[in-house]
Amino acid sequence: MEKLTLIKVGGKIVEEPESLQQLLSDFSKIKGHKVLVHGGGRSATAIAAKLGIESRMVNGRRVTDAEMLKVVTMVYGGLVNKQIVAGLQTLDVNALGLTGADMNYMRSEKRPVKDVDYGFVGDVKEVNAGLLADLISKGVVPVLAPLTHDRKGNLLNTNADTIAGEAAKALAKHFEVTLMFCFEKKGVLMNENDDDSVISELRPESFNEYVEKGIIQGGMIPKLENSFEALQAGVKQVVITRADQIGKNNGTKIVL
């Protein structure tokens, strides 16, 4: 099976010109097949504010009403996505920007209202990886925006970590997939105030123990749960690292 590296980068990295340039340069040097998944939340918040639209977050997730949906569609599917694609083309990477609606590669359903009404937020139901895999084997590099659709004409805001995890699982049937979550720390930290206290390897039992002790908390918990799920679904390896460490084999390796 041919190898594929799927990298998810947070908004901050792709929204600042210098860090974006560095990321694209590092990404372009990855050998073999690759996919990039990006966020863009800070840009969406800033542009919404200029338009007089208030941003509401609950547990780190954006509440997406009809007006905010227009903003995230413009920012994620347009501004951020196309800047990345154009930047990669200058580095001879033949990138193609996609939302889940393009080629119907990722279908979701509007999240049901329980304690919180998240509005137009999608929970992924189906990934059609065959067409993506065809494009990838032809040398195309997909750049995936955090938007899906419900096949009823609605776009839905979908967490970029989820997009990365679901795409990696579906592509694992076609490639040997390494999934990398990149953020501003060098990996999962033993002590959040010490950037060098990276946990080099994390298994389910140590993960549960660290959560109980409060060493791992907040948004890192769902990221790691996604990582274990991806491995159970056939993804070869999952790494959590800093964006400038791509290709250097550093960070936290998640294993079963």
Image: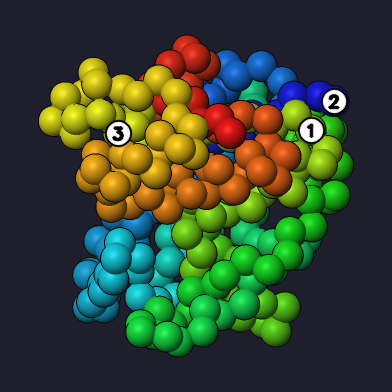
The front one of 243 and 252 is 252
Residue 86 seen by the camera? no
State the CA–CA distance, disc 2 to disc 3.
32 Å
Circle 2 crowding by C-alpha within 10 Å: few under 14, some 14–19, many from 20 = few
Give the residue at mark 2: 1
Q: Residue 160: horizontal and vertical position, in percent?
A: 49, 53
The front one of 246 and 228 is 228
State the CA–CA distance, disc 2 to disc 1.
6 Å
Q: Earlier in the sequence, mark 2 or mark 3?
A: 2
Instruction: Give the residue type at disc 3.
Output: Glu
**Residue 137: quadrant of the picture:** top right
Q: Earlier in the sequence, mark 2 or mark 1?
A: 2
Q: As drawn, is 18 to the left or to the right of 38?
A: left
* Image disc number at residue 175: 1
Q: Nearer the viewer, mark 2 or mark 3?
A: 2
Instruction: Give the residue type at disc 1.
Output: Phe
Residue at point 40%, 39% (across, down):
207
Q: Which residue appears farthest toward the left when viewing the image?
A: 193
* Image disc number at residue 184: 3
Q: As drawn, is 138 to the left or to the right of 45?
A: right
